[in-house]
C-alpha cells in the first residue's frame, strides 16, 4: 500500500471515529475550520469549513486555495453560503452542531451559529482533541519518523557547542541543524498565550525565570514580547544546558529534553537528574491501559518528595502543576498528567513525560521522553543517552 | 530620556488614545487578553486580563507569570474573579464593555460576558487594530531599527547563495543569518489561517502555487500542513528568487521583498519588475495624509493594465486582491490597500507596498518596501538596491 492509499484509509478511520462520537452525542453535524482539525480530517489545509454530517460524506466549503478537488468541494466566499449549498446538495438542515468553540473567535462562531439558526453549539474543540489523542497506525509511523530525526539532531549538539557561546548562539546552531534535518519550522501549540519559537534552551539561572506561557519551564527570552527561553547570556562553567527543542519533523510531533553541562556541575544537579530518570523508569514499569494519568503524576511527586526535591520540581519561583502531556499535531494535547486529571491511559495514546528540576544558579535538569501506550504496556519512542552529557 | 522612561511615556500616550476612543464610543471599560494587545498597552506580556476603565488607571489581572509588579496588579485564577476584585478596588461595575471579539475564542468570550453580566461586547479587535495602525515616535524608532537589520541581512544574501542549492537550502542559510542579526523568530500575523515560518522564499514555478493562507503570494511548502513558501526544488538557471523573509528584529516589524536571479532571466521578468518599481515611485509621489488607500490600489492597477501585466499581477492561478497592508506588531495590520478600502492615509501610518508579478516558469518579481506616512508626504523606511540582483 503506498502513502496516498494509506492516508486515504486513515482518513476514513478518523472520519468514522468522529461520526461514531457524533452519533453517541446525538449531534447531527460538525463544522471544523482550524488548520489542525481540517488537516486531521482531510490530509490537507484549506481556508474554509469542513462539514461532516453524523452519517454520510463530508462537504468541503473552501475559500482558498484554488484547486481543491475533493468529492463535494464547494467554493464559498462567506459562511452564510453553507446552509444554502447544503440544501442544494440535498442535505437535511442540522438542528444540533459541533463547533470548535474553544478556539474559533467569538465573532466567527456567532456568525456560524446564526447561519445555522442554532443558539448553542456542542464543543468540537474538546471532542477533536480527545479523538486526536488516540493515534492511528498511520500517525504512529509519522511519530516514529519524527523521533528518529529528533534523536539525530540531538546527537549533533556536542559538535555544535563552543566554549564561550551564549545560550542563544547555541540555540541558533541547533535550529539550523533542525531545519537541515527537515524541521517544519512552526511549533504548533493549543490555546492562547503559548508562544514559542522552535523550542526552548535553558542555561543557568535563566531556568528560574517565570514565564507567562504554560510550558513546563520558563526563561526570560531576549525580547519582552516573547518572554520565554534563552536570554542571550554566556554559558558559564558548571552550568547545565537543558535542550527542549521542537520535534517538528513531521506534522505529528515528538517531545524530548536532554541535558548537557559546561564542564562538571554540582552533585545536587546529578542527583536530581537521576531522580528524573528513575521516575521515567518507574513509570515505564507501571503505565498501561487503564492506569490513570493522575496516578502517574502522584507517583512522580512521591519520588520527588522522597528525595526532598520538591522546592526545585518543575521550577522554583513558579512551579508547573503537571509532569506530562499528550503530543501530536499540537505539542500540548490531552491527556495532561496532573494531580486531578480524570483521564485514563488507553492504547495508542502518545504522551511526553517531563519531570524536571531547576537547581538555583546551576540550571535545569531532568529528561523528557515521548511514550506510546501499547495494548498492554508502554513503549519509549525517543531513544537517546539520558545522562547529563558533559560538553 | 532613557529607554524605560521613553517606554513609560509612550504607554501613557497609548492608554490615553484608547480611553479617548472609549469615551467617544460611550464604552465604560475594556478588557484585553491577547499577547499583542497586552504587550501594546503594558510593554510586557502576561497571561491574564488588562482592564481599562474609560477614565483612570488600568488594573492588571494576572494568571502568570509570578512577579508582575505594575500598580494595581491582582493575581487571579479565573475570569470570574475580575468583577469581585473590581468592586473591592472601588471601581464602578461597567455596563458596556470592549472585548477582542474577533480573536478570543467563543468559549472564553462568552465566559467574560457572563462574568460582567453583559449580553454583547463592542469590538476591541477592530478598535485596537485601528489605534495601533498609527504609530507613536517610540514605535517608529523600533521600526527604523528593525529596517536597518532587515537591510543588513538582505545584503548578505548573495554571499549565502551557492549554485545548485534548493530554495529551502537558501532559505535555511538566510534564517540563520536573520537569527544572528536578532530576528525574534516568531512571525506574528492577525487572524486564523495565516501560518508562516520566518517569511517566504519563492523560486520558479513554485511562485504560481496557490496557498490557503491570505498572503500576497503562495508556494507549495514542503509539508501538507504548512502549504506555503519554498518547496525544496533546486534553483535553476534563469529563475528568479523572491525573498520576502520576516523583518522581525524588534517587536514592531518591517516588510521588505527583493528579487535575485540565478544568472540572467527573461525580458518580461525584468520589465514587470521595473513596473513594480515604477508603481513604488509613483506612489511615493502622491501618497500623503488624506489620500485614500483605495486610490493607491487603483493607481497601481492602472499601471499594471497599461503594461498588459494583469494576468501576472499578484499571482496567476490565484490573485491576491490587495497591493499593500499596514505593518506593526503584526505583519497584516490596517490599512489594507484594496480597491474598495474605505481607509484614508494619516500621519504615522506605517504600511508595506508590494506590487508583485508571477511570470510562469520564471518565478516572482517585484519589490516590497515599508513606508511611513509623514505630516505631508511619505518616507521610505527600507532602503536597499531595488533592481533584480543576479547571483
Image (cartoon, coloured by chain):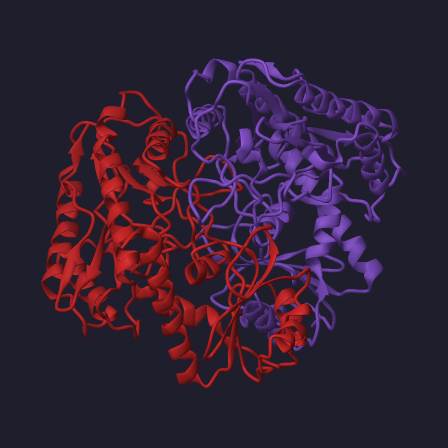
Chain colours: A purple, B red
Q: Along the line of sight, which residue is nearer the eye, A258 or A83?
A: A258
Q: Is residue B387 left or right of residue A176?
A: left
Q: Is residue B326 above or below residue A158?
A: below
Q: Is residue B229 left or right of residue A28?
A: left
Do we see residue B334 in this rendering? no
Image quadrant in which the N terminus of chain A is located: top right
Residue B347 lies, in percent from the top left, at 21, 68
Q: Along the line of sight, which residue is nearer the eye, B275 or B79?
A: B79
Residue A33 lies, in percent from the top left, at 58, 57
Residue B268 lies, in percent from the top left, at 16, 43
The residue at 57%/54% (across/down) is A192
Do we see residue B257 in this rendering? yes
Q: Along the line of sight, which residue is nearer the eye, B373 or B264?
A: B373
The residue at 49%/45% (across/down) is A227
Residue B11 lies, in percent from the top left, at 38, 63
Q: Along the line of sight, which residue is nearer the eye, A116 or A289?
A: A289
Residue A338: image quadrant is top right
The residue at 64%/78% (across/down) is B87
Q: How many marks?
A: 0
The residue at 41%/55% (across/down) is B214
Q: Is residue B253 left or right of residue A123?
A: left
Amino acid at each position: 500500500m503506498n502513502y496516498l492509499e494509506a492516508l486515504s484509509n486513515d482518513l476514513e478511520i478518523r472520519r468514522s471515529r468522529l461520526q461514531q462520537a457524533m452519533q453517541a452525542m446525538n449531534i447531527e453535524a460538525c463544522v471544523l475550520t482550524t488548520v489542525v482539525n481540517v488537516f486531521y480530517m482531510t490530509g490537507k489545509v484549506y481556508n474554509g469549513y469542513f462539514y461532516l454530517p453524523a452519517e454520510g460524506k463530508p462537504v468541503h466549503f473552501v475559500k482558498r486555495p484554488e484547486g481543491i478537488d475533493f468529492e463535494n468541494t464547494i467554493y464559498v466566499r462567506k459562511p452564510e453560503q453553507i446552509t444554502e449549498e447544503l440544501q442544494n446538495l440535498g442535505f437535511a438542515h442540522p438542528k444540533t452542531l459541533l463547533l470548535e468553540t474553544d478556539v474559533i473567535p467569538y465573532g466567527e462562531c456567532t456568525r456560524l451559529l446564526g447561519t445555522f439558526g442554532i443558539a448553542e453549539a456542542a464543543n468540537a474543540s474538546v471532542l477533536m482533541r480527545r479523538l486526536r489523542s488516540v493515534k492511528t497506525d498511520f500517525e504512529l509511523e509519522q511519530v516514529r519518523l519524527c523521533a528518529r530525526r529528533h534523536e539525530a539532531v540531538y546527537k549533533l549538539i556536542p559538535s555544535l557547542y563552543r566554549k564561550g557561546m551564549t545560550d542563544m548562539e547555541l540555540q541558533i546552531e541547533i535550529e539550523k541543524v533542525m531545519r537541515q534535518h527537515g524541521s517544519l519550522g512552526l511549533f504548533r501549540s493549543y490555546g492562547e498565550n503559548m508562544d514559542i519559537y522552535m523550542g526552548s534552551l535553558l542555561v543557568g539561572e535563566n531556568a528560574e525565570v517565570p514565564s507567562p506561557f504554560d510550558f513546563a519551564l520558563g526563561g526570560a527570552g531576549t525580547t519582552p514580547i516573547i518572554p520565554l527561553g534563552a536570554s542571550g547570556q554566556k554559558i558559564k562553567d558548571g552550568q547545565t544546558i537543558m535542550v527542549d527543542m521542537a520535534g517538528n519533523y513531521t506534522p505529528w510531533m515528538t517531545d524530548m529534553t536532554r541535558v548537557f553541562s559546561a564542564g562538571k556541575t554540582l552533585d545536587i544537579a546529578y542527583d536530581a537528574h537521576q531522580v528524573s530518570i528513575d521516575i521515567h523508569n518507574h513509570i515505564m514499569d507501571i503505565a498501561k491501559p487503564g492506569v490513570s494519568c493522575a496516578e502517574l503524576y502522584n507517583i512522580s511527586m512521591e519520588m520527588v518528595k522522597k528525595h526532598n526535591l520538591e522546592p526545585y520540581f518543575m521550577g522554583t519561583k513558579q512551579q508547573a502543576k503537571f509532569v506530562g502531556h499528550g503530543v501530536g499535531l499540537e505539542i500540548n494535547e490531552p491527556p495532561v498528567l496532573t494531580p486531578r486529571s480524570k483521564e485514563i491511559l488507553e492504547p495508542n495514546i502518545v504522551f511526553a513525560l517531563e519531570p524536571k528540576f531547576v537547581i538555583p544558579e546551576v540550571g535545569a535538569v531532568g529528561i523528557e521522553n515521548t511514550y506510546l501506550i501499547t495494548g498492554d504496556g508502554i513503549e519509549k519512542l525517543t531513544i537517546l543517552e539520558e545522562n547529563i552529557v558533559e560538553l
